[in-house]
Image (tube, rainbow, N blue to C red):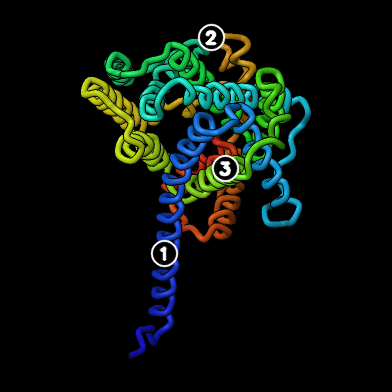
Amino acid sequence: MNLTAPNAPGRRAWSRLRSLVAVNLRCIAYCSLYCLAGPALILLNAHIYNKTAFPYPITVSSLGTWVCALVTRMAVKTGLCATPTSVTNKYWLRRIVPLGVLTAIASGAGNNVYRYLSVSFTQMLKAETPVYILIVMLIFRVRIPSCGSVIAVILICIGTCVASVGELKFSWTGFALQTAADISEATKLVLLQTSMADDKLSPFDSLLHMSMATAFCQACLGLLLEPAALPSVPYQSPFTIALLSLSCLLGVAVNLLTLAVINCTSGLAMKLLGIFRNNLPVVVSVLLLQEKVSTLQFIGYSISVLGFLTYTYLQSKSPHKVIDSEPTTPEALELGEGAAEKAAPKSKGSTEGSKAQGREAETKIATYMKEQNRPYSAQNVFDNLHSVVPKAQVQNLMEKL
């Protein structure tokens, strides 16, 4: 029996249905692999640091970042990806390099934690990140948090304290390293939103530029703190070399899958997937690796997860409270409070200019949607295309839609 509709409208509807099913299945596959690759990399690296003769976390993460930087550049050179947006040396030094330094510190300190604390407790401590984001926002005067966000952060703090008291093998060194990693990550996220929110860099462009800067910073940090790492590589067993190679490949996969998930989901879905992915290593460590978790620790972690979910929900329900809703320019950050209005670009003051911007944004967005084979809707524009055109143009188009 022929299932294809005989008329042209029916064929078009059938074609759209097949295309929609294919897009959704591909998105489900990306999300599933995204949730599995991250925890797999965490567990693999923890095994390398503790069970092999290569206890050098900074060097391991540096190798993965170098491979990622080389893969992205090879993709551009071979034509698999579009030519990235070029940046000036001033832009590189003022915006890319600081983010690379913070990423190197966060990854170096965060990977070192697994030498002192269990995987499950380390993942519990990572739930504190919104606390430090809130503090950094206040320090940089980016946004005054809402009352609900403060309550959610207090819940996270209480849960973390309870989980720390219940930890059977607590280490102050590991706790300090994880705190440093969380603070660096929070600072990076705030600076990323405040200094690069209005730039025309796509997620792939950001990965391309950030990976090289991070790789250089990690290499310098590794040579300074782990000078014996690279000379010991030739003396490692073939099994250890295989594990290091697998770690590099998983690192590249995590970055590429992150880009894929960004392109096929909304911001809220990305946050929820991140929460699930952070919890998965805890479950695997307890069930498969037989790590011991006390009842008090489980209660504390449950409170932290509740606070984290509340924080994510409040951010999604109040877009004007999100960090990147009204980004502050670097000049405003340098001048301090009240300088955002002075440093903001001046409006043309004409209706014709706004209409021209709207038409330009609409053309760019329609072209992008066609290339990505995605349905053209206001929600997709708002969720996924803020990196294609300036936010002012996107907002004008959203009002038009």
User: In the drawing, what numbered circle is on residue 243?
Assistant: 3
Q: Identify the image quadrant of residue 64.
A: top right
- Mark 3–mark 1 Cα distance, whole angstroms, equals 39 Å
Mark 1 or mark 2, which is nearer the start of the sequence?
1
Location of mark 1 (residue): 20
The location of residue 335, given as percent across then percent down, is: 62, 9
The residue depicted at 31 percent of the width and 32 percent of the height is 313
Local packing at callout 3 (Cα closer than 10 Å; few below 14, some 14-19, many 20+) is: some
Residue 57 visible at all:
no
Q: Given contact means CB atoms under 8 Å apart, are the residues at marks 2 and 1 in contact?
A: no
User: Is residue 242 shown left or right of residue 85?
Assistant: left
In the rendered view, would you say 174 is above or below 257?
A: above
Residue nearest the viewer, comparing 322 with 255: 255
Q: How far across and down, in percent of the image, does residue 342 sit?
A: 61, 15
The amino acid type of the residue labelled 1 equals Leu
Which residue sits at x=67%, y=42%? 67
Q: How crowded is mark 1: few (under 14 residues within 10 Å), some or many (20 or more)?
A: some
Q: How crowded is mark 2: few (under 14 residues within 10 Å), some or many (20 or more)?
A: few
Instruction: Say which residue appears at 39% left-offset and 73% top-offset.
Output: 13
Amino acid carrying mark 3 in the image: Leu
The residue beneath circle 2 is 337
Q: In front here: 282 or 189?
A: 282
The N terminus sits in image quarter: bottom left
Mark-to-mark CA distance, 3 and 2: 49 Å
Badge 2 element? loop
In this rendering, the label closer to the viewer, 3 or 2: 3
Q: Earlier in the sequence, mark 3 or mark 2?
A: 3
Q: Nearer the viewer, residue 286 or 321?
A: 286
